Amino acid sequence: MVGGYAGKILEIDLTTRSLHETPLDYDEARKYLGGSGLAAKVLYDRVGPEVDPLSPENLLIFMAGPLTGTPAPTSGRHAVVTKSPATGIFAESDSGGTWGQALKWAGYDGIIISGKASSPTYLWVKDGDVRIRDASHLWGKDSYETDDIIKSSVGERAVVACIGPAGERLCKLAAIMNDGYDGRTTGRAGVGAVMGSKNLKAIAVEGSRKPSIVRRGELLENLKTIIPQIKEYMVAMTKFGTGNGIVATEASGDMPIKNWRQGSFVEGAGVTSGQYMAEHYLVRNYHCASCPIGCGRVIKVENGPYKTAEGAGPEYETLTALGALCLNDNLEVIMLGNELCNRYGVDTISAGAAIAFAMEAYEKGMISQEDAGGLDLRWGNPEAIIGLIHQIGKGEGLGLLLGEGVRIASERLGGLAPEWAIHVKGLECAMHDPRAYHSMATGYATGNRGGCHLQSASYLWERGPQAFKTAIPTMPFEWYEDRHGLENKGKLTVNCQNLMSVMDSLKLCKFVFNGRVGIENFANWTSCITGLDISADELMEAGERLYNLKRMYNVRHGISRKDDTLPSRILSHKRGTGGSAEFLPKFGEQLSEYYDARGWTEEGIPAEETLRRLGLDFAVKHLPVAARI
């Protein structure tokens, strides 16, 4: 018996309203683990370059991992994988909360959705019983309203993943929201638009079938030591959330400010920080399933023009995207903006990037106040930030253009506008700056979904041994005293991307690192839960396999070295102030080192021998001729 997994994948064709269960192939599960890894294999096999991301032929794949729904710390997660309408390439997005646990307990490792319903629809899944239900009464409702209405019908124990009005309209910034007012999100790469294209409003799940744990006693004995350790070292994040690091991030030069142009935002960082939010607005903590940290914020603004409901507070990325990136130091505006994005079902990172782009275009005369529906788009203007979120969510005015993402918006504006569109492969960059941590340059440029810090998280290893060496033990690669140094930074990115692929497939939260937990712990938990003897080395090899698989999906769509680059602003603009005032990434040399460490050609294509070594022989046929032996 293999523990951890539910043992079944649910497949639903919304066009024919048919469904069937596919037994999990445990050999495939060991090879691709679960989560985004196993889902990537499904996408690779079934969705090719000819498929339009918003067509019925695209797949929308929800996938848990072998640790989801177990006591493994921070394992309350699931992935959504599809072909992105924002980038046209591989898309994965990750969410915490309790939805993934509920899916596993309902009896499924994942749900694969194809086709398109003839009218608005939602799915109700409970302990193996699956119903396709009418959602006409839900169409047009925001995500919080949708959660309330569905629970009133099926019961309060259900956990709902749904789109808001932005997803219904196929906005390319659309997210999938889960866990109601707690505001957990699979936010990136337009996954909500794919869900909307299928006329699928929501998936509600409930279950009581907890997965088996083969060596339960050994696991629980291990966790007796690990969980107190995590709590001890993560106390600051428990108190202040992911915004705990806002002030330090600004000081290091890692925080993007004024659409990535400015180096300092000292006072603004102080009054938009997790500490300030905890002091003035925090109601209580929110814990994802199996998480001892509780970094989630439940906040409320009682009165005034930016009054909010009691619900999810902004995370670090949102605090920066709707704050410093737009030169906004009003925390209440950020908190209301976060709630509106959650209700509309809009990715806050991409929304903030789009607003900052619009503010720069306004500053430079390419967008007028009339274009913006009367909004004054000067930097930091609260009414402009809130107004543009409404326009993006509703698909009105300038929001209709910004909802396409900054790459498309800049191309349509023309002129110099692409210079101000900060993205990689069409995905707006996350709120960390490669001019602060050198390895992030290759991390962003080669990210399989675009400009994402969490597909590498290599900056953790560049903060230096004094800060983090004891925090992340048993890692199979070295530390760096000089975050601006060049040596081995491409190789560092490779190792970190492999590790993050493991976590995204087992379904573990990246924050668990800071609790002094490492790869040996992940291997131990996986072995105890599944009953398989899985070593840290096997996990790392699986991570390398998965990263190459996702890259090969993109290679089939024409991705190569020409696409592995950064915005010119990051490569050439010195900010002049702050913790990384004068540094620019030495990108070309670092990228060549990265390709060499990956076993890819100088054009960025996995070599045939690399694919065969990793057991990806089936992908060889998709290699360009020059990459074959």
Image (cartoon, rainbow, N blue to C red):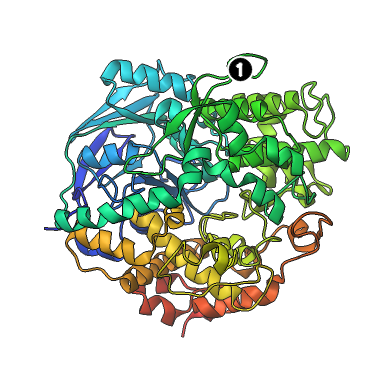
Give percent across and percent down for residue 61: 37, 46
Q: Out of 437 and 606, give the one closest to the viewer.
A: 437
Q: Which residue shows up at 64% across the image and 30% down it?
A: 334
Q: Out of 497 and 461, give the one closest to the viewer.
A: 461
Relative side of 581 to 591, left or right: right
Residue 347 to residue 309: above or below:
below
Farthest left residue in view: 1
Residue 517 to residue 416: above or below:
below
Give percent across and percent down for residue 429: 63, 51
Q: Amino acid at mark 1?
A: Lys
Relative side of 402 to 296, left or right: right
Farthest bottom residue in view: 629
Q: Which residue shows up at 36% across the image and 48% down it?
A: 74
Where residue 158 sits, quadrant-wise, is: top left
Where residue 513 sits, quadrant-wise, is: bottom left
Q: Is residue 395 visible?
A: no
Give percent across and percent down for residue 606: 49, 74
Q: Which residue shows up at 58% across the image and 16% down it?
A: 302
Residue 21 to residue 589: above or below:
above
Relative side of 129 to 190, left or right: left
Q: How many marks?
A: 1
Q: Is residue 512 visible?
A: yes
Give percent across and percent down for residue 7: 18, 50
Residue that numbered label 1 is attached to: 307
Q: Which residue shows up at 42% across the image and 59% down it?
A: 516
Disc 1, SS: loop
Q: Out of 36 and 430, give the one closest to the viewer.
A: 430
Crowding near the residue tagged with mark 1, few <14, some 14–19, many ≥20 C-alpha atoms within 10 Å: some
Q: Out of 539 and 286, give the one closest to the viewer.
A: 286
Residue 563 to residue 81: above or below:
below
Quadrant into which the N terminus falls: bottom left
